[in-house]
Amino acid sequence: MNHDQRSTFLQHRLTPGSLSKSSRVQKAPPKKSKTRAPQRLTSVLPVAPVAQRAPLLDVPTEIGLEILELALIATPSAAATLATVSKRFSALVANIIYKTVILGSLEAIALFNRTVRSKPAIFLETHVRTLAITCSSSYDTKARVQLEEIVAACTGVRILAIPRPGILTSALISRTRPAQLIIQNFDACTPFEWDPLFDQAPESPAAHLSTPLTHLRICEPGIVWHSPGSTLDFFGPLPHLTHLALARSISPEPNFNDRVFVQEICTILASRAGLKMLVVSIYPARWPKPTRAACSLCSHSCLCKALIRVSETDKRLVLLTAGWDTLVEEDPFGFPDLRSTSPPFANHGSWRPGWRSFWENWRMSDKRIVSLASGWEPEISPDAVRWMYPSLPVQLRERRNFWENWLVME
């Protein structure tokens, strides 16, 4: 075999598929094992029943949080115990505790101010949704500074309740812009006076609240009278205001600013098409003794008569009669029992505070509702107000819960 023949033979041997079927090596089939496979043993013990799903796991998250919140309200000491269970429980308890903060004393203001300084800014921004300052004795500079720091830190607050409006003018709180604002009365009194004074103040000292504010309520008439227009000017144009509540007392002097008040109420209704509700709470002219203060809309009062006429043409205007819960104490020096033209506003010694607790009772603070009847004589219902938006206009005699839904109205 020469060289060329040998090369051709080797190429033929190494080419794939060149081997015939008979010449290919056949693999032997695997031998079967002679050992038997182990049979499955049947347990003679009874099978345990399948564990049932815990009922609590089927409760919606929102309801579970409500249950936990009610439990913490009933047993506040349990909050510290729950917070130590795990980090997730600690975060859950923090959400419940800081969601609504009510500062009713100087001690509470100081303690929460310490919390504000120790917590990161993002914590207070995301946790505090309602902030109510109900302390009536914070008349020192230290408390004023602490309150400014607290309000400035709670930039995510949606509902803010304060006794006086002056703190809203502080430059520190310009980033705190609640949608719903409750003010006890619109007086510039310490520690909520604003600087500069009235004659030097800008036209809208709290203009930073103009855009976000949708609900504004002035709970009680102040010692210094402010017209409805000047009250709104304090906040600027208020383009998104949908719910407004004002307070007015019947003056012992006939026609004292009555015409101005009614004219500006009409102007507000005419110029604000987006306003869904304007509530006017009318308080008595004097602080009576010895019965609790309450007011009824009298047909002979020019103010009441004029407002009733306006409410007949514009159903957005709601008239409520109001009063205070506290009685004037007997004079300790035995002076004659004279009626005061204004209720006491401070708590001195054994005297009870004259103003009702505007935050705790704001939901049902107006005792009677005016049901407009034929003629000028209004009907006074002795029950609490029962009315709610958005079924406007609706007959007021339906008595649905009004103030309870004030802050959740859309």
Image (cartoon, helix red, strand yellow):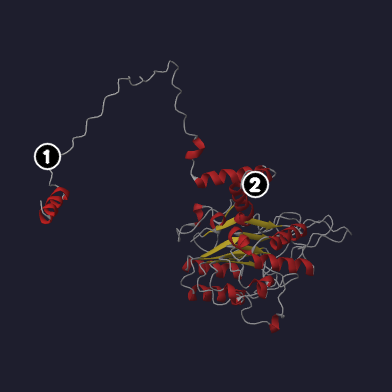
* Side of 187 relative to 68 (left or right): right
Height in image: 65 above or below 172?
above
Answer few, some or many: residues within 10 Å of disc 1's Cα (few below 14, many 20 plus, some between 14 and 19): few
Reading the image, the residue beneath label 2 is 83
Height in image: 237 above or below 160?
below
- Give coordinates of residue 321: x percent, y percent: 61, 60
Q: Residue extending furthest right?
A: 333
Tell me which amino acid carries mark 1. Answer: Lys
Res. 196 image quadrant: bottom right
- Give coordinates of residue 310: x percent, y percent: 51, 69
- Give coordinates of residue 242: x percent, y percent: 50, 67
Whether residue 296 is visible to the viewer of this picture, yes or no, is no
**Looking at the image, do the residues carrying marks 2 and 1 touch, with CB atoms under 8 Å apart?**
no
Give me the C-alpha separation between circle 2 and circle 1.
79 Å
* Side of 350 relative to 79 (left or right): right
Q: Which residue: 57% across, 62% down?
A: 158
Which label sits on residue 21?
A: 1
Q: Secondary structure at mark 2?
A: helix
Of discs 2 and 1, which sits in the foreground? 1
- Give coordinates of residue 188: x percent, y percent: 71, 73
Answer few, some or many: residues within 10 Å of disc 2's Cα (few below 14, many 20 plus, some between 14 and 19): some
